[in-house]
Amino acid sequence: MSKTLFDKVWDSHVVRSLEDGPDVLFIDRHLVHEVTSPVAFQGIKQRNATVLFPARTFATADHNTPTINQHLPVEDPLSANQLKALEENANSYGISHWGLGHEKNGIVHVVGPEYGITQPGATIVCGDSHTSTHGAFGAIAFGIGTSEVEMVLATQCIMQPKAKKMRINIKGELSFGVTPKDVALYIISRLTTSGATGYFVEYAGEVFEKMSMEGRMTVCNLSIEMGARGGMIAPDEKTFEYIKGREFTPKGAAWDKAMEYWKTLKTDDDAVFDKEFNFDAADIEPMITYGTNPGMGIGISKNIPNAADISGGASTYQKSLGYMDFHEGEEMIGKPVDYVFIGSCTNGRIEDFRAFASIVKGRKKADHVTAWLVPGSHKVESAIKEEGILQILEDAGFELREPGCSACLAMNDDKVPAGKYAVSTSNRNFEGRQGPGSRTLLASPYSAAAAAVTGKVTDPRDFLKNNN
């Protein structure tokens, strides 16, 4: 029987299928951080259980970490307690722990691929919704809840119903200045935030084949924002080249054996999906959100839609615009910007900082803009310095912070004040996501850089044309 990529990976990990129930799925890699793990570990202790396969579990601190002065004690007591609990639990059960100050520390969905923990054909879970990031390598990766974290720690398995299958094809060449982040926001704007609910999505077509691994991670990261259980892209030579030689990837004969399997991980030509969508790359321009969910996005040159042209409740739409203090028919270009954030598991990789630097080079940060530039890991931080990007940023008036989730969510010190506008390269623009009362405009690193030097929403293509 012909199978999709998702079928091949899922079926090979089923330990048992329960009649009229979920599958018992074996998990290859379990990533944990300080937010969702403490209660799970508490459950393990209360049941006098243990972690079945500590070597398959990896812990890193990211959500609650400060992004300045990480060498000092963490001031916030809740954050300090969570970070301490992660360290103690990891040490108690023999789990690798990359806490503050560790050279491997960083955002869980950035360090996983960097060290070769993420591999094609693997099943990967984490108590974090954006675990879908790892699907860029041809893995089945999804977020789980606290009770499920406990289940995986104790059994290395999880009970899950098999998702339906969706394929999203994009043909053609991306236009000038369009990034993977724009591709993802475009798809979500077309499908809405619930359009892929119940599905695992495979991304296919020329656009994704030509993307870098960093770009593929950005797209898969945002799969969850259209309701999908996860997203994945078939592994290819780019994938294999990216992971070869990394710390946790196979070596020697084991690598050759793994490659034999990995090269089979693609959808059969006559495999059937439950739903398919086809888009044209030429229709995508730099995107920006104007509302309070990632589906409320438009091309940056467009005007805010009228309620009559939007499916769903008009009152809900007006409420969202009211929160943002925007109005139907207004241009996004020229909207004032107070904060700019580049980072997160969506856009905190070296490719993103290269893009940001390409626009700010030779220019100056707008005086009134507060900018948080936060690498996703120490590897990214080192690359920024080694490639000369740090000097470009500093010459333009920016400062580089230390790795962490930072302003993606209001769970650390990097909070956007109420009423202020932030152009953010993160993944969610919900009410209060970046701080109580904050207003978030999701965009690419190019668009974030353009806003940072002008102090307003600006089409990044204007700067990119000048650079060329």
Image: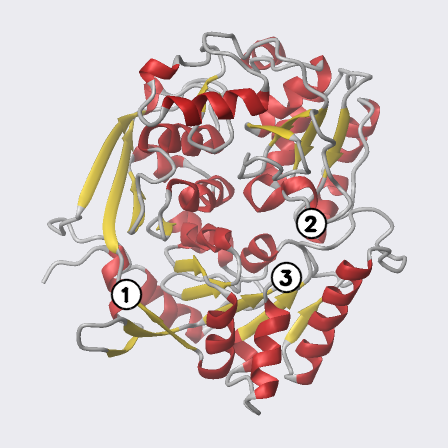
Judged from the image, the secondary structure of the residue bearing numbered disc 1 is loop
Q: Earlier in the sequence, mark 1 or mark 3?
A: 3
Q: Where residue 233 appears, x then y in whole percent?
A: 35, 48
Q: Where residue 382 appears, x then y in whole percent?
A: 74, 47
Q: Give the position of the C terminus as an image quadrant.
A: top right
Answer above or below: position of 272 versus 374.
Answer: below
Amino acid type, label 1: Pro
Crowd tier of the residue under label 2, counting other residues whose Cα lies within 10 Å: few below 14, some 14–19, many 20 or above:
many
Q: Is residue 277 left or right of residue 220?
A: left
Q: Which residue is mark 2?
A: 411
Q: Which residue is mark 3?
A: 35
Front one among 348 and 391 = 348
Q: Which residue is mark 1?
A: 161
Q: Is residue 288 visible?
A: no
Q: Are marks 2 and 3 in contact (CB under 8 Å)?
A: yes
Amino acid type, label 2: Met
